[in-house]
Amino acid sequence: MYGWLWAFAHCILGRSLREQAKAKGAMTERDPDERKYEKKKWKKRKKKWKKKRKKKRKKKKKKKRKKKWKKKKKKRKKKWKKKKKKRKKKWKKRKKKRKKKWKKKKKRKKKWRKKWKKKKKKWKKKWKKKKKKRKKKWKKKKKKRKKKWKKRKKKRKKKWKKKKKKRKKKWRKKWKKKKKKRKKKWKKKKKKRKKKRKKKWRKKWKKKKKWKKKWKKKWKKKKKKGKKKWKKKKKKRKKKWKKRKKKRKKKWKKKKKKRKKKWRKKWKKKWKKKWKKKKREGQIPEKEREKEKEGQKPEREGQKKKNLETTFTLGLSLNVSNCFIVVLLV
C-alpha cells in the first residue's frame, strides 16, 4: 500500500515542479526524440522496480508463513507430549495388573503340574501291568489258533487231493470213450458227404448240358409270350384311362354348370339393383323401357361381350383336350 502511495505522490510532485520551471523560463522545451528516449528509460526503471517489489512481498509472506508454521508445530508438540505421558501412565498400570495375573496363573500351573505328575506315574504303572497281562493272553490265544489252523489245513489238503485224483480218472475215461465215438462218427459222415457231393456235382453237370439247350428254346417262347401279354396290358390300360377321362370330363361339366348357375344368380341380383337405381335416376332410354314393359330383358353391351368370351374359352378347351387324346393314341 505504502509503495503505491509514494509513487502516486512522486508523479504529482514531479509534474508540479516541471510546470513551475516552465513558468519561470528555466526549463526549455525538449526535442521529441529526446523525450521518447527518456520515456523508454522510465519504463525500464518502472519494470525493475515492480520486480523488486514482488520479490520483497514474496519474502515477507514466506516469513509470515514460517512463523505461523513454527507456532503450530510447537503447539502440536506440546499436545503430543501430554498425550504420550498419559498413554505411558496407563500402559504402566496395565502392565502391573497383567504381571500380577500372570504370577497367579504361574503358581496355579505349578501346583497343577505336580498333581498331574503324580497321577501320571500311577496311571503308567497300572497301564504297564495291564499291557503285560493282555500280551500274555494274546500270545496264548495266538498259538492255539495257529495249531488249529494248521490241522484244518492239512485235513483239507488231503481231502482235496483225493477228490482231485478221482475226478481226473473219471474224466479221462469218459473223455477217451467220447473221443473214439466222435472219431468214428466223423469219419462216416466225411465219407457220406464226399459221396453225396460227387453225385450232386455229376447230376448238376449233366443237367447243365441239357438245360442249356432247353433254356434257349424256352427263352424264345417266353419272349413271344411276353410281347403278346405286354400288348394286351397296354390295351387294357388305354381303355381304363379313357373311361377315367370321360368320368372326369362329366364331373368337370357338372361343376362348371353349377358354377355358372351361381354366377348367373349373383349377376342377376347385381344387375337388378343397378337397373333399379338407373330407373330412379332416369338414365334408361325409352326403347329399353318399352321392352321391359312387354316382358323382354334388355341386353347390355358388356353382357354380350362376356357371353362371347365364355363361348370362346369353352371351344378352345375342347380342342386342346381332343389334341391331347390324339397324341396319346399315336
Image: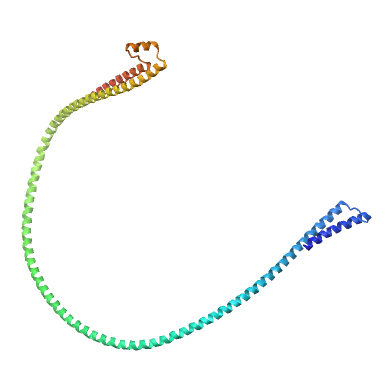
Residue 246 location, quadrant: top left
Q: Position of residue 38 (x, y in %)?
A: 84, 56
Q: Is residue 222 left or right of residue 66?
A: left
Q: How many marks?
A: 0
Q: Position of residue 324 (x, y in %)?
A: 27, 23
Q: Is residue 156 left or right of residue 261?
A: left
Q: Residue at x 37, y 16 (%)?
A: 301
Q: In the image shown, does 205 or 242 lie closer to the viewer?
A: 242
Q: Position of residue 250 (x, y in %)?
A: 23, 23
Q: Is residue 93 above or below residue 279?
A: below
Residue 118 location, quadrant: bottom left
Q: Position of residue 182 (x, y in %)?
A: 7, 58
Q: Quadrant of the N terminus?
A: bottom right
Q: In the image shown, does 159 or 203 lie closer to the viewer?
A: 159
Q: Residue at x 43, y 87 (%)?
A: 107
Q: Is residue 186 above or below residue 271?
A: below
Q: Is residue 141 left or right of residue 111?
A: left
Residue 294 location, quadrant: top left
Q: Looking at this view, name the residue that lies furthest to the front.
A: 280
Q: Residue at x 6, y 56 (%)?
A: 185
Q: Quadrant of the C terminus?
A: top left
Q: Is residue 153 above or below residue 10?
A: below
Scheme by which the image is coloured: rainbow
Q: Is residue 246 left or right of residue 24?
A: left
